[in-house]
Amino acid sequence: MIQLEKLSKTFTQKNGTQSRAVDSVSLTVPAGKVCVFLGPSGCGKTTTLKMINRLIAPTSGRVLLDGVDTTTLDPVELRRRIGYVIQQIGLFPNMTIEQNITVVPRLLGWDKQRCHARASELMEMVALDPKRYLHRYPRELSGGQQQRIGVIRAFAADPPVLLMDEPFGAVDPINRESIQNEFLQMQRSLGKTVLMVSHDIDEAIKLADYIAVFQNGRLVQFAEPDELLAQPANDFVADFVGHDRTLKRLLLVNAADAAAAMPSAGVDTPLATARTMMDDGDSRHLVVTDADGRPLGYVARRDTVVADADVQRCGARLREIAAHAAATDNLRVLLSRMYERNLSWLPVLDADGGYCGEVTQESIAAYLSSGRAHHAFSAAPLTAAAPLG
C-alpha cells in the first residue's frame, strides 16, 4: 500500500522566486491496485511520482510504503525495491537484452541461472522468444519490442511497487494497445501496486483501478474510473475526461449494473397470469425459466391474448431467446450485440446460467444518465428472479 500525506514540492528559480510544483497531495493506493496520475503537462504528475522513490526530495509531507516513512529507508535500497519505467525506455545500448532485464537482480546478488530463468519467464509474458532475443542488443529490436523490454525490466526483481512515467506514450497506437494488454495480463498475474503517469484518458480508463486528476500541482479528484466519468468533481475534470464521457463509461459498466430485476414465469404458469405480470411491469414479454431458474425462452404479450388464457400454459407458447448477456459483460458489448441482432432487450444470466433480470436500451440510457457510478470492488450482484406458477 502507498500513502501520500500532504506531499508538496517547491522549486526555487534562478531569480530567487519560488514555484509550487506539487501542493499538499494526499491519497492512498491499496496493495495490488493500479492508480493512474492524469492531467495536462506541467500539472505535477511526474514530480509526484518521482517523490515516491525519492528521485526528487519532497519539500514537505510524507510517502508511506506499507506504513513505513520512506525517508527512514536508504534511498538506493528503496529504489531497488521499486520498479521504474520511463517513456524513453532507457535501455543500456552496450548490454544485451538479458543483461538489461536483469540489472537490478544482479545488483541484488542473484546468481546467473536465476537471472536467466527470470528473464526468460518475463520475455514469454510479452510474447518474445527468449532464445531468439535475449542475446541481442537494444538496437536490434523494434521500438515496440524495446518498450516491452523496458516494462518487463521493472518486474525483474519482483518489486511490490511499480512506478511508470508515460510508459506507452512513445509507441505507435497498434503496439501501444498490444503492450497495454500484455501489461494488464502481467498485472492480473503478479498483482503489483502500480502508480502510472499518463495524459491519455482512454489509457487511464483501460488500465486503472483508481485515477488521480491533477491541476496546477493540486489533486482535483481521486476516484475509480466509472465514478470519475459519472461524477466529475468540477468543470476542469469534466472537460479533461471529454464530452463523450458517458460513452466512455460503456466499457466500465456491466450488465449487472444496468439491468432491471424482473419476474419470470414457469412453464406451468397460466397465460392469463403471465399477461397480468406483464401489465404490472409495463412489459411486452416475460422470460420463462425451468425449475433451476435457467431461461427456456419467453412469451410475448400477444401470445397471452387467447380465449382460454386461464387454461393454456406458458410452456405451450415459448419463443426462442435470440441472445443473452452475462452479468459481467460490459455495456459496449451488450449494445453491439443488441444492434447486431436488432434487439431491444437481453436477458442477463449469472455465472450458473440463472436468469437474474434484463437489460434494455431504456435501462442502459437510464443508468448512464442517472450519474450513478459502478464501484468495481463493492457492487452487489443481482439476485435471481423467482419463477411463478
Image (tube, grey):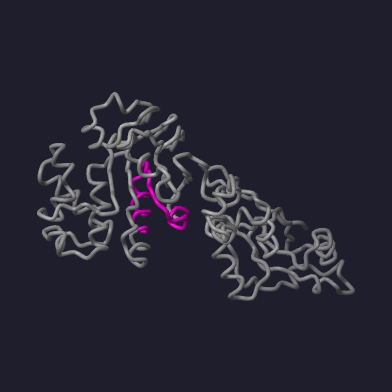
Q: Is residue 81 visible?
A: yes
- Whether 256 is among the magenta residues is no
* Residue visible at 74% across and 61% down in the picture: 265
Report the predominant secondary structure element of the magenta stretch.
helix
Q: Quadrant of residue 59?
A: top left
Q: Quadrant of the N terminus?
A: top left
Q: Nearer the viewer, residue 139 or 331?
A: 139
The percent coordinates of residue 89 (x first, y second) are 24, 54
Instruction: Check the image and name the residue furthest to the right.
Output: 307
The answer to whether 278 appears left or right of 169 in the picture is right
Q: 61 and 204: which one is in front?
A: 61
- Judge by depth and name the residue closer to the eye, 165 or 208: 165
What is the magenta range?
180-205
One can see residue 351 in this view: no
Horizontal arrangement in the rendering, residue 296 relative to residue 223 (left or right):
right
Query: Which image quarter holds the C terminus?
Result: bottom right
- Left or right, 327 with reference to 36: right
Q: Which of these two is toward me, 172 or 82?
A: 172
Q: Residue 147, how many percent across, how many down?
A: 26, 58
Residue at image position (19%, 51%) is 119
